[in-house]
Image (tube, rainbow, N blue to C red):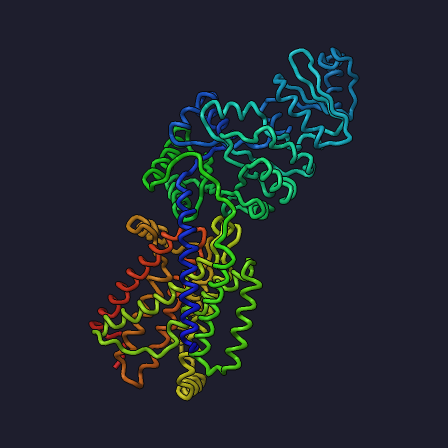
Amino acid sequence: MKKNNAIFFFLSLGFAFSVFVLFQRIELEKTLSAVETAVDFSDIRHLAEISGKSAAQILPELKDVGITTVGIEESTVRELNDRGQIILADGREVNKWKYIFNRSPVFLESQQIANKSGYTYIFTENPSLGVMIKNALLLKLPGVSVIGTYTGRYYLVIALADKLAVENVGLGFWEEEVKAVKSAGFNYVLRPKHDPLVSDAWIDTLFDAFAGDKHLTGILPSGGRIPGSAEKLAEKAEQLNIPFGTVEFAAIAGADETASILGKTFLCFSPQGKNASTKISASLRSVRERNVQLIYIHPAEETYSEFLSYAGAIKRGLDDNSFRSGKFSALPLWNGGFYAFLFISLAVLAGALWLLSVVANTSRQFEIAYVVIAMACSVFFSAYTPWRLFIAFLATVIFPVLAISKTWQKPPLAPLAGALWLFLKVSFISILGGIFVSAILSSTDFMLKINSFRGVKLSLLLPPAFAFVILYGREKSYFSTSLNRLWHKRLELQHLFFGIGIAAALILMLLRSSNKMSFVLPFEMEVREVLEKFFFARPRFKEFALGHPLMIMGFYFYSQASKTKKIHFRPLIILGLIGQVSIINTFAHIHSPIGICLFRTFNGLALGALAGAGLIVLNSFFKFIDYK
């Protein structure tokens, strides 16, 4: 079998397996049509307070506007005391009462309990709450004497421990709150907290009372880390068949590890800020573009009626985007499979060999050794995430360079049509690389952003750098002469401004090449909103406003230029690779549905082609580029 035929065979085989994996992923993405909208029970108390109503009165109103789920957080002794649900005191405070009233409090006298300075007293009018507190302290404070007793109309918990050691202890979930939520027709999310006293024994009992409850959506940790160890939490969640959620853009230590061990997971998004319109748009975008299944909203500075309008707008937006507001099904543990990853890996490595053979005279011995090593590595490592990430990064670098590494033949078309045709051919190879990347990273951990593609900034820099070496390497004498002439040229002010402009553009591009933007340009958000309004998936600025127009102009001027000037337009093509790399990076966003990636890429190609054609037409009138 000839070398080119063998490379084509492995590329075709890898493409077939990629399509197979992506069809599986599409079927899995179809199960993500249901979305829940949640609010904290503590926020319900706040909303009840500002509305002048009780929590029981506002629950039906929240349900009517689209709230489906309530978050039940673990309470601490201090929080219950601050809310007036318990009274917390220690021996010193009890002694103050004795000093003022010249007798011990009735709740101690009735039980003939002698006050001691080292005691902590917790009393409440709700016996079920008192029993929950007693049981929690017994588990959290082993070796400490804890008793519970009725004293008239109070239930009293006494712990032989310092008040400071008791007041920050997480107490678990009060079943009366859960019953109130369920009776109002809501689902609920359990939100455990971490504290230094969490143990395996505590995790073993924390969720038992809620196992098998059809109203339970899952576990979503509260605070900066999960309670206990990831292994224990995942083990308990799996035992009770309870899904575990991670919060997008939130740094919760241990959450990703727990989700990757458990497998039955969901992604939550909580919009931030004070502008309701911005939060609504962000919430709908997270569901449409990032596989989010739970929107968790909090009141900011809204009035009660404004919060109802805010929640109702999210519900209407979900309906308009063909999502169903209601109980979702958590994603199972899934990946494309070892054999699919094996053949996709071989396809990408075959593409790398093809690129090497184009730019260098590789010997037969080298090619045989390369094939043996590539097959061995693929067989042994394709099941491992680091290898899959390496193959994805390799595809991101080699396929755009491969697309422009050959000498371009001028097609028998009009100059502009010919440039567009060459641009589409290059983009097709980049899309092929994107399909390989999307397929080899297809698994639940990437879909829920537990793992993510790495090396975005480097992948934007390497293809143009490699293309520069490859394209100018063909004109070594011209390049060396030009470089020598440039080195000895006197530096003028316009050169300095030009260099600063190029450097600033590159730095800006690199700083903005992640999902979290540290800053936005003036009017950028307005432009984004317009693009989102008119396109199903917003095209990327790096593609339609930068890379694609530059590449089209480069192909057009290259084909039209005189022989001595052809080399001048290669920088346009090299910089145009930014758009091609961005295409592949779009497919590397595994948390985005395949359909979104395809539409975004198509929109970028269409707008980029229009922008490139427009610049060429403008040049025909104003002659700002001389190519003859």
Q: Is residue 89 left or right of residue 574?
A: right
Name the one closer to the observer, 368 or 406: 368
Task: State which quadrant residue 192 falls in.
Answer: top right
Residue sitting at 67 percent across and 24 percent down?
88
Please report the residue visible at 49 percent of the width from the left and 46 percent of the height from the top: 248
- Can residue 102 be seen in this snapshot? no
* Residue name at image x 31 percent, y 69 percent: 423
Q: Count how many numbered circles sit on residues in the image.
A: 0
For the point 78% across and 13% down, the residue is 112
Pick the quarter of the image with the N terminus: bottom left
Residue 103 rendering spot, x and y as whole percentages? 76, 12
Where's residue 368, x and y in %?
Answer: 52, 77
Rendering coords of residue 356 (x, y %)? 46, 77
Viewer-closest of 318 and 231 = 231
Is 243 above or below relative to 303? below
- Across and down, in percent, residue 219 comes to 55, 37
**Vertical comparison of 600 with 239: above or below:** below
Q: 19 or 516, which is in the foreground? A: 19
Q: Nearer the viewer, residue 387 or 458?
A: 387
- Identify the image quadrant of the C terminus: bottom left
- 209 with respect to 315 (left or right): right
Residue 522 appears in view: yes
